[in-house]
Every structure is written in C-alpha cells, then in structure tokens.
Amino acid sequence: MLSTLPELPVYNLWPLELSRGEGCRIWDANGREYLDMYGGHAVASLGHAHPVWAEAIAAQARSLTFYSNVADLAVRRDFAKRLVERVGVGMVGVFFSNSGAEANENALTLARTVTGRKTVVSVEGGFHGRTLLLSAIGGIEGYRKRAAAGGESLFLHRRELPFDDIDAPDAIVDEDVAAVIVEPVQGIAGARPCSHAFLQALRKRTRDTGALLIFDEVQCGAGRCGAYTVAEREDVFPDILTLAKGLAGGFPVGATLCTQAVAEYVEPGLLGSTFGGGPLASAAGVATLDILEKENLVDNARSRGEQIFRGLEAISGVLDVRGRGLLLGFRTERPSKEITAALREEHAILAGGCMEADVTRILPPFGLSESEASRFLEALSTILS
Ligand code: PLP
C-alpha cells in the first residue's frame, strides 16, 4: 500500500494523483485524461469545476465568507426555501450540517425527541455514516464490530430488518421503536434498490406504531436516481429525509429535512452546527439547484442511467445489474478490483467497488453524455470478452 503519512490511511488508494477536472473528465498529475464514472463517491453531481457553480462560490467568498447560524443570512434562507420546495414529499423544514453522517445523527436526535423512544431499526446492508453511533446502528456488520467496545455494542437499542422483506416490518417494528432508518437505494451494499412494496410496508408499519420513517438519501438522493429523491420517484413520503454528497455539487453540506409534525418539536438548542449552512455552502447549494434545473440534469441522469442499465444487461460476462438512475452496480465473475483496475489502466475510466467483492459501482456526474456512456460500455465489453 502507498504510504499516505502524514495523512492517515482511509481507503486503499488508486495508484494515481488527481490534479484537475472539467465536466465528466478528470486529469492526473501526469496529464493523463480519465472519464470519471465514480464522481468522487457520488458527490460530483454537476461534474468537475462547473464555471457557474465556481463563480457562485467565489462571488459569495468576496462578499461574506462566513457567519454561523446565530445570524439570519439571505443566502441560507434562500437555500432552505429552494431546497424544501425542490424536495417536496411533505418536507417543510431543514437543518443544515456538513456531511451525511451529521445529517443522519440529527435525524435520529429528532426521532428520539419526537417519540420519546429509544429503539432504532435499520435494514441489513444499510450504511448511514462512520460516527460511533451510526456505525453501531447501521446494517453492515463490519462497521458495527468496529464500533463495539469490548465486544458490546455502543448502542443497545437496535433491531434489524432483513433487506426488502415486506413481512418483516410487522414483526420487528413496534411501539418501542423511535425510528426506522433506510436507504431507499442502498449504496455501499452495491446499488441495491428497496422495492416499492417494502418502502410502503415500512411507511404503513411506522405510521401504525407511531415510529418515524427516515429515508437516508445521502447517496441516492439530490437527483442521482433520476428523480430529485427516491421518495418522489417511489411516491412514499418519509417523516425525515437526509441529503448530502451531491447536494451542493461537491461543497460539503448535509441536510436533515422534516415534516411539519416533526418541525414542531424543534426549539433553539436542540440542533446546532458552527459551519452548517454557512454562506459558501448555501451559495453552492443554490447554484447546484439552479444548474440542475437549467441543464435538465436530473432527467439526463435518468436517461443515461437507462442507457447504461440496458447496455450492461447486453454485455455477456455481466451477471446482474441493479440500481436506479446513475447509481448502478453490476456483478461479474472476476473480482471488481480487477475490473476497476482494467477500466482505469487500459481504458482511462474511473469506477469503484462496494461491499460485495464482485460488484462494481458507477456514480458518474449527471451531465454524462450518450457517447461517454457508450465509451464506458464498450470498454467494459472489451474487458469481459
Ligand atoms: N449515508 C449514506 C447512504 C452514505 O452513502 C454515506 C457515505 O457514503 C453516508 C450516509 C455518510 O456520509 P458522509 O461520509 O458525508 O458522512
């Protein structure tokens, strides 16, 4: 492994150094150009260095770079209003933070405050962030183990739902449950969509028992699945919805959105973050919403997603395809590590893995062109032939 010190190692690094990007293309320090089918972990929704987005941040930096949410700011107010309108699905309020994990931590704070209950239910394979609490409540065993001290979970009030089992909510969710948290399309588990029937079963059971339903759309939301949210796409409305990653086109921001019934419990002092919803993040967020609309990028994510999905199904050697929009995974006989290395080294295309060693995940910018999508499919087809 490459030594990364003084940075502590986080991932097994790709053997390259990135230096600049433009749209769906990115260059390494030696000047080699790549097609970015990974988007820096589903973040670069607008592509790299979008000039309008960059200018919005620069203009805000020249005017007011930072003030915390102790003061009202027009740019934050504007972002909140625009975001709530764009998300719809019954969301009326938003709390801004800086990451997906913070958005989810605050969602759980809200659920426990509203219900006065302790238990949190998550879904097998669901990933919600790397803080100690979220590692302990998530649906991935490896993270739960890491969060356990002396073999005992740091959070003793967790239950798990089997993935996409529509009978399980009735058996597992009861009046002790504060919240069910679910990724409507699981990301790290390998682009696995929950069925409409499962999401509906969760909605019905949480409503019947007084638990809150939290959609973690940190990876699948903000346009990636070919609608602004999966909640909208599936017409299933949660009580709380979280966004981050592509929300501000690459500027760090997390959002915890909630219904009127939840918002009524929020008084000053319950939630807080020094940097959350700062002027630069808010300006980047507003610019991202504008650009998505002007360039019709969510529709493009949907069409390119369908093109790639069909193209993958037609490649012999692709064993199965899953996902929605531009959050897609495909299984191959060869390990994903070999597939992503061949894409990168032989075809100058960046793609990523997931929890399953034989599933490759792609998360490109929404402006991907038809010919760029075809280039990826042709490269994969050559590798697998
Ligand atoms: N939730 C989901 C679905 C994610 O995919 C991630 C990150 O990969 C997170 C939460 C955590 O987000 P962050 O890394 O911004 O804290």
Image (cartoon, rainbow, N blue to C red):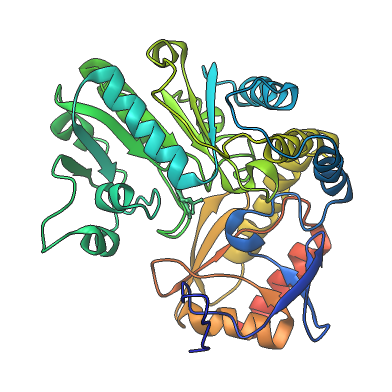
Residue 146 located left or right of residue 327: left
Residue shown at 46%/75% (left/top)? 8
Q: Is residue 49 visible?
A: yes
Q: How many marks?
A: 0
Residue 209 located left or right of residue 235: left
Q: Is residue 187 above or below residue 274?
A: below
Q: Is residue 310 above or below residue 270?
A: below
Q: Position of residue 311 (x, y in %)?
A: 66, 63
Q: Position of residue 40 (x, y in %)?
A: 63, 62
Q: Quadrant of the C terminus?
A: bottom right
Residue 26 located left or right of residue 146: right
Residue 369, quarter of the rendered image: bottom right
Residue nearer the viewer, 40 or 351:
40
Q: Is residue 124 above or below residue 95?
A: below
Residue shown at 51%/82% (left/top)? 5
Residue nearer the viewer, 180 or 81:
81
Residue nearer the viewer, 348 or 8:
8
Q: Is residue 197 visible?
A: no
Residue 165, quarter of the rendered image: top left
Residue shown at 46%/38% (left/top)? 103
Q: Position of residue 263 (x, y in %)?
A: 44, 15
Residue 315 located left or right of residue 346: left
Q: Position of residue 206 (x, y in %)?
A: 27, 23
